């Protein structure tokens, strides 16, 4: 699946997108965030406060308990503020 990163999540990881194949036990957005955070220090820093991270699966905003099975693209971004 393709992962896309935005704003400071992208800056901390150091890439805008990547293709990953998480292990079978990673079934939700929250579990995916946990798995990503364990990959290295950049991911750990980007996902150090997982509850503030927002996600979208195939362009639809989802909660962290959303299933990732069959997802083509998952985007991660911090909360946005209006102006």
Image (cartoon, rainbow, N blue to C red):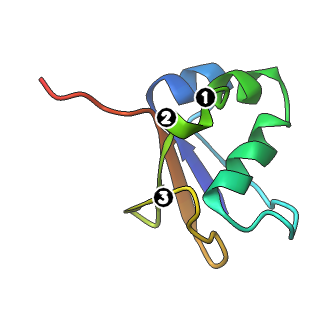
Question: Mark 2 vs mark 3: which is more N-terminal?
Answer: 2
- Work out whether residue 14 can be spotted: no
| Residue 49 marker | 1
Q: Vertical placement of 55 versus 46: above or below?
A: below
Marks 2/1 in contact by CB < 8 Å: the verdict is yes
Disc 2 to disc 3, C-alpha distance: 11 Å
Measure how far apart labels 2 and 1 are at the Cα level. 6 Å
Label 3, on which residue? 63
10 up-or-down from 34: above or below: above
Query: Dot 3 lies on which element?
Result: loop
Q: Which residue is mark 2?
A: 52
Taking 53 as reference, is 19 left or right? right
Assess disc 2: are there few (<14), some (14-19) or many (≥20) residues with their C-alpha within 10 Å of its C-alpha: few
Asked if residue 29 shows in the view, the reply is yes
**Quadrant in the picture for the N terminus:** bottom right
Image quarter of the C terminus? top left
């Amino acid at each position: 699946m393709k992962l896309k990163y935005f704003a400071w999540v992208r800056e901390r990881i150091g890439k805008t997108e990547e293709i990953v194949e998480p292990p079978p036990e990673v079934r939700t957005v929250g579990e995916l965030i946990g798995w990503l955070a364990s990959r290295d220090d950049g991911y750990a820093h980007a996902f150090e406060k997982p509850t503030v991270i927002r996600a979208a699966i195939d362009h639809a905003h989802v909660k962290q308990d959303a299933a990732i099975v069959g997802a083509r693209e998952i985007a991660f971004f911090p909360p946005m503020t209006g102006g």
